[in-house]
Image (cartoon, rainbow, N blue to C red):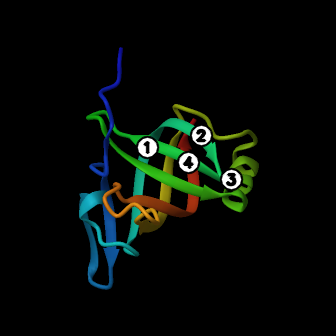
């Protein structure tokens, strides 16, 4: 079965503020906002010292997440193997706007990741 084309920035995330958490699409969370989301990995690509992960839910809503090399190593060590497509992960991070691309969809700068279902 084919997955729907990803709608980047539409993935529902938990936005954490000083007053609690609310669910909203990533595109509606302000830059530097703290978020948490659990979703399957649809694709993984290495890019400029980072790992770029496409998270996509069953409805086709998606978000890009960026992991630094130390986060990759910690996730791989905890899992006992590298992350791969199909792993369901819980991600915590901050919302970022890629530099130099103000019209690009917002993405997640990951500070914690764990596999919830391999």
Q: CA distance from mark 1 to mark 4?
A: 10 Å
The vertical placement of 12 against 35, above or below, is above
Q: Nearer the viewer, residue 102 or 58?
A: 102
| Residue at (40, 60) in percent of width and height | 101
Q: CA distance from mark 2 to mark 3?
A: 12 Å
Residue under numbered circle 4? 52
| Residue at (67, 59) in percent of width and height | 71
> Measured from the top left, where is residue 35 in percent x and y?
39, 66
Q: Nearer the viewer, residue 44 or 100?
A: 100
Residue under numbered circle 2? 45
Crowd around label 4: few <14 · some 14–19 · many ≥20 (10 Å): many
- Circle 4: element type: strand
> Measured from the top left, where is residue 88 in percent x and y?
49, 40
Q: Toward which corner of the image does residue 118 lie, by quadrant? A: top right
Residues tagged 4 and 2 counted as in contact (Cβ below 8 A): yes
Residue under numbered circle 1? 55
- Circle 3: element type: helix
- Circle 2: element type: strand
């Amino acid at each position: 079965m084919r997955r729907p084309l990803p709608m980047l920035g539409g993935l529902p995330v938990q936005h954490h503020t000083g007053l609690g958490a609310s669910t909203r699409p990533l595109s509606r969370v302000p830059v530097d906002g703290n978020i948490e989301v659990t979703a399957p990995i649809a694709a993984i690509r290495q890019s400029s010292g980072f790992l770029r992960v496409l998270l996509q839910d069953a409805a086709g809503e998606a978000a890009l997440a960026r992991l630094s090399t130390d986060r990759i190593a910690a996730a791989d060590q905890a899992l006992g193997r590298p992350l791969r497509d199909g792993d369901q992960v819980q991600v915590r991070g901050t919302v970022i706007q890629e530099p130099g691309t103000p019209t690009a969809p917002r993405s997640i700068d990951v500070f914690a990741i764990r596999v919830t279902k391999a």
